[in-house]
Amino acid sequence: MEEKIKIAVTDDETLFRAGILFILKRVPEFEVLFEAENGAELVKQLSGALVKPDIILMDIKMPEMNGVECTKVIQKKYPEINIIALSSYGGRAFITNMINVGASSYLLKNTSPKEVVSTIKKVYSTGFHYDQWVHDVLEEEKQNGKAVNIQVLLGNQLSKRELEILELICNQYTNHEIADKLFISPRTVEVHRKKLLLKTESKNTAGLVVYGIRNQLVQVSPDI
């Protein structure tokens, strides 16, 4: 039996939250772990949860701790969790703020249920998914000289963790060996590997090795 995608939902609007939960619970591949009405409650639930979600649907404007601040905390403590922003606000500032702090996708609350389900599956599979309108916003911000973290579009900005994993991949470590060395799960390593393939536009592990060496990002053992 295929492992289900574990999800948490954070939104201060009770009716909207109930609607999203109704949709998600009808998808056989999904398992909703818990819900929260603000960022502070979400962080508290995460700290006490034995099983962490793969995906969190995150509202932005919430009391106590908003979506941007909450995403910062989660990215620092639980980098393996992917955040999908789900907001009523489609302004550039909202989009770029969430992506700058590490959101893997950005959806508006008037998005169709089918698109929400599809986005969750894509983010789980590849680590991120941006619709064309979000791409357009980020590209325009880039052309205007704004400091936007569009590493998934540029393919040339890797996080510290990704660089660590890239170096270990280049030195022929397996996913399980990397997981043991970095004290993370094999599933987390696999997510980072998929992100590396996408960001570097590599087709396979050999392509990652070539990318790492060519761009002088890694130190490879003489024995390799």
Image (spheres, rainbow, N blue to C red):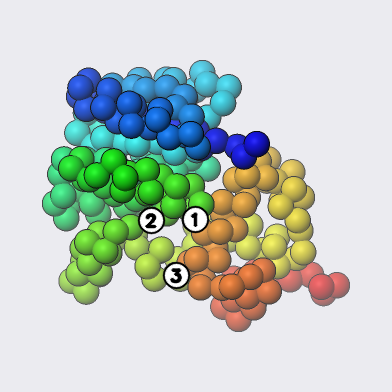
Q: Nearer the viewer, mark 3 or mark 1?
A: 1
Q: Secondary structure at mark 3?
A: loop
Which numbered disc covers residue 216?
A: none
Residue 85 placement (x, y as % from top left): 30, 43
Identify residue type, mark 1: Thr
What whole-number distance in Å separates the C-alpha atoms at marks 2 and 3? 14 Å
User: Which residue sits at x=52%, y=59%?
Assistant: 195
Mark closer to the chain start, 2 or 3: 2
Task: Name the residue at 38% across, 56% down.
Answer: 129
Q: Is residue 172 left or right of residue 81?
A: right
Q: Position of residue 155 (x, y in %)?
A: 44, 70
Q: Amino acid at mark 3?
A: Gly
Which numbered marker is on residue 126?
1
Classed neighbour count for the residue bearing mark 3: other residues with Cα under 10 Å, few (<14), some (14–19), many (≥20) = some
In the image, 208: left or right of 87? right
State whether residue 164 is above or below residue 47. Answer: below
What is the distance, in whole Å, between disc 1 and disc 2 at their CAs?
A: 8 Å
Which disc is residue 155 wearing? Answer: 3
* Residue type (three-letter) at the residue carrying disc 2: His
Q: Tell me whether the residue at label 1 lies in contact with that at label 2, contact meaning CB atoms closer than 8 angstroms.
A: yes
Residue at mark 2: 129
Q: Position of residue 5 (x, y in %)?
A: 51, 37
* Secondary structure category for the residue under label 1: helix
Residue toward you, 45 or 108: 108
